[in-house]
Amino acid sequence: MSDPNPQTDVRPDSESESGPRDRPALLAATPDVEAVSDWLRTLTALAGLLGLLLTLIAVELLVRI
């Protein structure tokens, strides 16, 4: 008869499972809060300038009509 606990025959495959040594590299690649907030502030400012530019172009085109 087979073993009632199938977990006893399971051997971890080193290629399919990530080991604990992979985690520090992933955490090191994650940016900190200050860097993310700087990027968001920059992207917000650029989006605002682009919106202002498009609004000015739209007003200019409407005034010429």
Image (cartoon, rainbow, N blue to C red):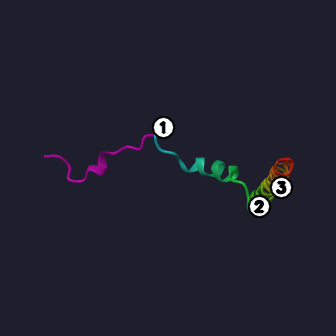
Please state which amino acid type lies under the numbered disc 3: Leu
Q: Is residue 12 magenta?
A: yes
Please state which amino acid type lies under the numbered disc 1: Glu
Left or right placement of residue 36 versus residue 1 in this view: right
Residue range corresponding to the magenta coloring: 1-14
Q: Secondary structure at mark 1?
A: loop
- Separation of marks 3 and 2 at Cα, in angstroms: 22 Å
Q: Residue at x 56, y 51 (%)?
A: 20
Q: Residue at x 78, y 61 (%)?
A: 34
Q: Residue at x 81, y 57 (%)?
A: 48
Among numbered discs 3 and 1, the one appearing first in the sequence: 1
Among numbered discs 3 and 2, the one appearing first in the sequence: 2
Q: Residue furthest top?
A: 15
Among numbered discs 1 and 2, the one appearing first in the sequence: 1
Q: Position of residue 18 (x, y in %)?
A: 52, 45
Q: Position of residue 45 (x, y in %)?
A: 82, 57
Q: Foreground residue, 17 or 50?
A: 50
* Closer to the eye: label 3 or 1: 3
Query: Can you identify the residue that label 3 sits on?
Result: 52
Query: Can you identify the residue that label 2 sits on?
Result: 37
- Separation of marks 1 and 2 at Cα, in angstroms: 36 Å
Local packing at callout 3 (Cα closer than 10 Å; few below 14, some 14-19, many 20+) is few
Query: Can you identify the residue that label 1 sits on?
Result: 15
Q: Is residue 10 above or below residue 27?
A: above
Q: Position of residue 26 (x, y in %)?
A: 63, 49
Magenta: main secondary structure equals: loop
Q: Position of residue 31 (x, y in %)?
A: 72, 54
Q: Foreground residue, 18 or 50?
A: 50
Please state which amino acid type lies under the numbered disc 2: Ser
Q: Is residue 5 above or below residue 9?
A: below
